Image: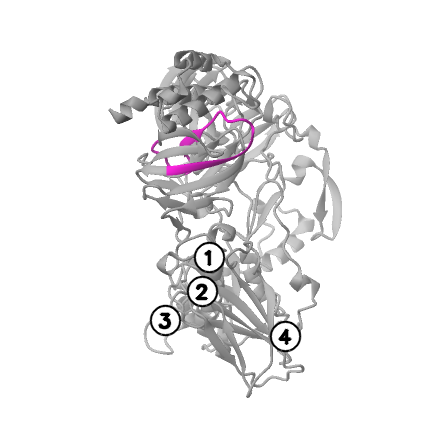
Amino acid sequence: MTDTDFSDPRYGIPVEKRKKAAKAYHGIKIVASDENQTHNIGPSLLSDEQLFGIVDAVGYHYNTDDRREGSPGSDTYLPYTRLATGENKYHEDKEVWYSEGTASFGYTDYRVANTDGQGGASTGIGGVQSALDLANRLVKSCANSKRTHYIFQPAIGSFYEGAQYSHKELVSARDPWSGHLHYDAALYVMQHFTQFARTGWENDTNTAGIWRTVPEAGYSGVSGTENVDGSNGAPSYMTLADPRRKDFSTVVVNDSDRRKTYRIKARNMRLGDPTMEVWETRGPDAGQAYDANLKHLVDEIRPDDGYYTYTVEPRSIVTLTTLDKSRDRETTRRLPGSGERTVLDTDATGKKHDVRDSVLYADDFGYEEEGDVEVGTAGGTRRTSQPYLASRGNQPRYMVDQTGAWEVGKDADGDNVLYQYMDQSMKDTHAWNWHTPNTTVGDFRWENYRATVDVSFPDPQGGLATLGVRQQKGMAASDAAYNIRVDPDGTWTFYEYGTVIAKGTVAAADRYRLAIEAKGASITAYVDGKAVHTYQDPTPQAEGRVKLGSDFHTTAFDNLKVEKIDGYAPYATALTDSMDASVAYSGAWSRKAAFGDAMDWYRSTSTSRTVGASFSVPFTGTGIDIIGGNTGSAVFDVYVDGKPIAKDAGTVASDRRRATYALRGLPDRAHTATFVLKSGTIVFDAFTAISGDVDGRVDTAAIRDSLAEAGDPVPGDHTPDSWALFDSARSAARAALRGQKGLDTLGAAQIAHRLDDAFARLTREDATTS
C-alpha cells in the first residue's frame, strides 16, 4: 500500500489525523484472491514479481489440492506448495490459506442416526459434509497444497435459519432473546488439532514457539477435493511438532468402516518421556448417549522396537501426542450443554419475556427500555457506557437484513424510525443475492398472529413498502408466505409468496398503516385498519417470521407490533428433528444427512415408502405439525397415546419447511403420537409441538353439532376397530366441551372433523359377516 495522498479533500481527513490514517492504511494486508475451485492466483504470483510483493497471503477455497499443469518447475505446477515452502525464484514464502471453509453440515447430534453408510449403516460423526469431513479437509489441504490456516464460513451462525445458509457452523446462536446456543461436535474435532499443539501466528524472529507442520509426516489419500469422502479407508494424517523438537502430535482421521493401524517412528526428536497419550472422538456405541465418546483419553502407549503402534477405530479421529494432557483442565473440559430455546414472546416494549399479555413482539425503534450498555474499547482492554443504538451502529434489535441498508434514524419530528437507505444507485448492480431490500424479524415458530407496521415515503422520487408474515426461508421480500405491498399512490397488492392474489387502491397518502392477520388458513390484509382482502389458502404455510421490504428508495417503518389472536394458539413451542434420538422408527427408513438440502431442517430427512413403516414422536402441547418436502401421496393411520385418532389421514403437497400434516385439538400435556404409513411416500424432516397458551373464547359449536349428529350408537353393534376410533373421537369431543385446557379454534374444528369421520366409518358387525 503506497498511497500517500491523504490530504486529498475527497477523503475528508482532518490534518491532525492524516498521519494516523496513513499508518493504518499502510498496515493493510492483502489476502488474494479467495478463488472458488480455480487455481489462478498461485501461478500469477510466481510470474509477476510486483504482484508477489503486494500480496501477503494466498487464499482459495472449496478445493484441497494444488495445481498440477505443465512441467515441474513451471508456474502452473504445484504453485501453492512452492509459495508455501519458499521454493520459488523469489526465495520467499507466503501463507497459503483455506480462505472459506465450513464446519459439519447440519448438527452432528442428528447425523449419528443416518443410514448413509455401507449397507444402510450409520456413519456416526463421519460421512460426507460431516465433522470428520472437516478434519479430512484440514489434513488433505495441508498435505496437498501446504495450507495452514482454515477460515470458517461461518464459525458462528447468528442469523436466522433459512436465511440462505443453514447449519454449517461450529456454534449456532440464532435466538438473541433466549441466549440458546448449540455447540457442535465439530468443535471437539477441531480441538484435536488446536489443543495438542501450540498454534497461532509466529513472530518476526521465529521465537514464539509456534509448532510446525511436518510435511514428511503427513498424507491424505481420501477422495474428493471439496466434499471429502474418507470411506475408501485411505490413510489421512498430519503431524505438528515443537520447533525445539521436544514434543509432537499426530492427528489421524479414519472416516471409513474399517479399523486402520498406524505405526509412528519419532526421528530427529529430543523427547523426554516417550509415552504417548491417545485422544479419540467418535460417535456413540449402541445404547450410549450421543456425546459419550467425544474427545476423551482412551489409551497411553510407548514405542515397541522404535515404533508407536495404534489401531484407529472406524468413523473416528484420534490425536497421538507426547504431551501430558490427561490432567489439563482445558483439554478435559466439556463444552456447555444447550439451554432452553424459548419462543420470542415479549411485553409491549419488546425487551422483556412475557407470555401473559397479548403481544408477541413490538419495536418502536426508540429503545428507551434498553438504557445504556457497556461496550469494550481499545481492543477490549477498557469498557465504556454507550447508548444502546450507538453501541450497535444504529442497527435495530433482532432484525436480519437480507438486502438493503436498514438503520434507525430520526424523522422530521425528531423521533426514531427504521429507514431503508439503499437508493437507485444500487438498483442495477446485480450483486450476489440481488433482491429488492428486505429485512426479517421474529421467531420461526410463530403461527397465528397479527403483524402491524406504519410506513411512509420520505423520498420524493418514489418508494414502496411491504409487510410479510410466516417467513421460513429465502432472501427476498416475496419469501414471506403472505405479504401486502403499498405504493405512495395508494395502490396495494396482496401476494402469496411471489404470486399476485389481489390488487386494489386506497386514497393516496404519504403514510399508511399495514397489517396482516394470519389465522390458520385464513389470511386477511389491512390498509389503515380496513380489511382489503381475505385469502383462504388450501395449503397454508403455518409458521414463520415477519418481513419488511422496500424498493431502492429511502422508506420509513415505525411501530412494528406482532400480536396474538384470541382463540388461536400463537406459536409452536419446540421443533424436533426427525433424526433426534427421541424419535422411534419401525420398518424400512432411509435417514439421510450427506448432501442434505440447506432448506431441510439441520440438512437431514427421514424417508419411507414401505407400507406399515411408522414413526413415533414424543411432545408436550396440543398438537404437532409434520414438516417436510412432500408430494402429498402419503396416507397415515394416526395414534395418540396408544389410541386411534385418525384412519387413512391424507397429507398435502408441501415444500421444505412446510407442514404436510397437522394434528390439533389434543389436551395440553405430554403425548406420544404414532404415524403408520398406509400408502405413498413420506419425507419426514421435523415436527413442531403446538403451544396451549390460548387467550380468548373458542367457538365449540361445531363440536356440539357433530356430537348431536353422531347420537348414541351401541358398541356391540359395530366392529371393534371402527368402534375404537369412534369412541376415541367422541370422548375427545366431550372432553373439549367440558373446558379443555389449551383448546383453540383450529383444534375445535379438527375435533369435530375427526368425530364426523369416525362416525362415518362405523361398520356394523353384520355388515362384515353377510
* Disc 1 to disc 2, C-alpha distance: 10 Å
Q: Where is mark 2, residue-wise?
A: 255
Mark 4: amino acid: Asn
Q: How far apart in space, not on screen, are marks 3 and 4 (Cα)?
A: 30 Å
Where's residue 256, x and y in %? 42, 66
Give the CA separation, mark 3 to mark 1.
32 Å
Q: Name which residue type carries label 1.
A: Ser
Read off the residue under disc 4: 206
Q: Earlier in the sequence, mark 1 or mark 2?
A: 1
Q: Pointers 3 and 4 in contact (CB under 8 A)?
A: no
- Magenta stretch bounds: 652-676
Q: Which residue is mark 3?
A: 76
Q: Are marks 1 and 2 in contact (CB under 8 Å)?
A: yes
Lower sequence index among marks 3 and 1: 3
Dot 1 corresponds to which residue?
130
Q: Report crowding for label 4: few under 14, some 14 to 19, many 20 or more residues within 10 A (C-alpha).
A: few
Pick the front one: 563 or 304: 304
Image location (x, y in percent) of residue 697: 55, 14
Q: Which of the 4 image quarters holds residue 299? A: bottom right
Badge 3 density bin: few <14, some 14–19, many ≥20, Cα 10 Å:
many
The tag earlier along the polypeptide, 3 or 2, is: 3
Of mark 4 and mark 1, the one earlier in the sequence is: 1
Q: Position of residue 263 (x, y in %)?
A: 50, 80
Residue drawn at (43%, 45%) of the image: 585
Quarter of the image for the C terminus: give it: top left
The residues tagged by marks 4 and 2 sit, at their Cα atoms, a distance apart of 35 Å
Residue at 65 percent of width and 26 percent of height: 347
Relative to residue 732, is residue 614 drawn left or right?
left
Relative to 684, 414 lies left or right: right
Residue 358 appearing in the image: yes
**Front-lying residue, 658 or 493:** 658
